[in-house]
Image: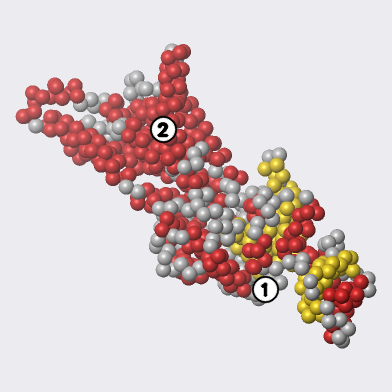
Amino acid sequence: MPIYAPTLPPAPDLHQGHPPALVLMRFDLARLWRQKIGRFFGFAFLMILLWKVARIYVDHLLQTNPAFKPMQDFAKTILTQGAAFQADLLNPASYLLWFLVALVGGGLVARDTLYRVRPLMYAHPVAPKDYLLAKLGFASLLPFAILLPFALLPWLMSLVLAGLHGPVWVTAPLRLLPAMAISSVLMGSLAVGASSMASTPRAGIGWVLGLVLGTGALSAMLRGLTGIQAFDALNPVELAEAWPQLFVGVDRPLVAWLPAILGTAFHTGLWTFVAARRTRPSEAVI
Amino acid sequence: MITLDRASLRYGPILGLSPTTFELPEGGGITGLLGPNGAGKSSLLQLLSGLLPPSGGEVKVFGEAPFRNPAVLSRLGLVPEGDRLPTGLRADRWLRMMGELSGLSGEGLKAAMIRSLDTVGMADRAHLTFARMSKGMRQRIRLAQALLHEPELLILDEPFNGLDPEARLTLMALLRDLAAKGTRILVSSHILGEIAQLTDRILLLFRGRLLAEGTVTEIRQLLDRHPVELRLTGEAQILARWAVEQPELAALRMEDGAVVISVRSPRDILPRLQKAAAEGHIPLLALDPLDLNLDAVFQYLTKDHA
């Protein structure tokens, strides 16, 4: 017969903790921090950022130092200061950023699938929406955090060096930050959706890259067949590059407003839906 | 503590668990969930650990439906089947995350980690990565994870799979100790010996149906179709002569120096046998029940329902 004990010891207080989504995001961040891929990407993005900041400083010198007067006309041709220049601030080697998102985001859900961690998480007070929120949040915050210095540092430097009439518009962050947010959510949802379809982190990376390149090829094919430029909105890389252009008002953006809205909604909705379906408790077999 | 009222689980067209009704009372103790592969053990555990809602009927743990119910989930601990853990990850970091997901933080979490690692005997090795741990060590860490928030109900799915005999015995001792301290433990296994070593109270599942519930003796007594076999060792001729006079006798066979009798109601015949032996009417040296064990019960039940 079983042994019955009269009482249990007092239960610990379980209501002091942090929200589950925050716990999971912090765990993923710590794991990423321990991995060494950050060194390569950190160096690469730092170099690109320095180049962009250096361009602003050179522009400042050309404007203010008489010794550079003869070079001004030449400089104007390479230092565009219109809307395209503002939008270009958020273009830190777009493919490199997508590659980073694939490398990190591709394993976010797939790793938990491989190690069957999800059933264990769902047996804790963690709802599937907490899990999805954590993964989407992390995958979206990563590109956002990388893009943030590209939007703010040149703007700050321009403001310090040349005041209100610098090469970066004073209102640039107001236009660039929403564009960054949309592009980041697009990247994050695609990465998490792709990762949820994979059973290993490597396969997840393959899925992300496959979806990015595959939808890009599909959009190019459809545009080539029909001649309709709006099909470019199927290409997530072009979409991510188009949003800063749209917000700063570039004359000929890669994708127009309506196709960009529809394309982004399509990708974000589809991949979030896929991720939600693939991370349901019923998919978590114990 | 656990109540199932005609609870069933379907995976699309496949019935994982037929409508099942049973109740486990409050308090500590170990209950074995026994059945061959595909019997529905994992389906039942998924229902109890709140991973899936029942397709029909009702499941209640601590008086509430466990599906997506933090009030229930924070009171139970789960050790799922399998040995897959993130190989490059340190056990203590994994435990910390799991503790935080249970709602622990700060000093409370630290104390819980120390306590649960002490309980499973892994306090000095928690800094190792999973890749550097043996299977037994990893299983103990998984158990520590389930114990962090001091659950009242501990659910273990095939916890002995792949463990060597020593690690198996260590884990069994650990579970017995936890049960003695008041934790209700539900252990699933498809290996009879493991459950028989661990507990007497079983839930027997077969092909998605709950065939029996209770102690081995209780269940055996309900199997009227299969008379209990008793081996009487001694003077076989005299013992056989005594046995054929008993109304409960269903069958008899002679062995070398013993007689094996099948009786329908052992509770009635055993006092008479005891009395006859005590008074010297029969030369009885030993009495062995041959099919009063879990193995026999399992065989009879599964044959009857096959």
Residue B134 spot, x, y in % from top left = 46, 60
Sequence order check, earlier mark of 2 and 1: 1
> Vertical placement of A179 versus B64: above or below?
above
Residue lying at the far bottom of the rendered structure: B279
Q: Image height check: is B153 above or below A107?
A: below
* Mark 2: few/some/many CA within 10 Å (<14, 14-19, 20+): many
Circle 1 marks a residue in which chain?
Answer: A
Question: Up-down: is A41 above or below B276?
Answer: above
Q: Chain of mark 2?
A: A
- For label 1, the residue is A4
Query: Could you say where residue B12 lies in the image, as x and y percent from the top left?
Result: 68, 40
**Residue B85 place in picture, x, y as percent:** 48, 53
Marks 2 and 1 sit apart, C-alpha to C-alpha, by 57 Å
**Relative horizontal placement of residue B235, taking residue A166 as reference (left or right):** right
In the picture provided, is A94 more to the left or to the right than B56? left
Location of mark 2 (residue): A209
Front-most of residues B241 and A40: B241
Residue depicted at 82% across the width and 67% down the height: B228
Q: Residue at x 28, y 42 (%)?
A: A40
* Disc ID at residue A59: none
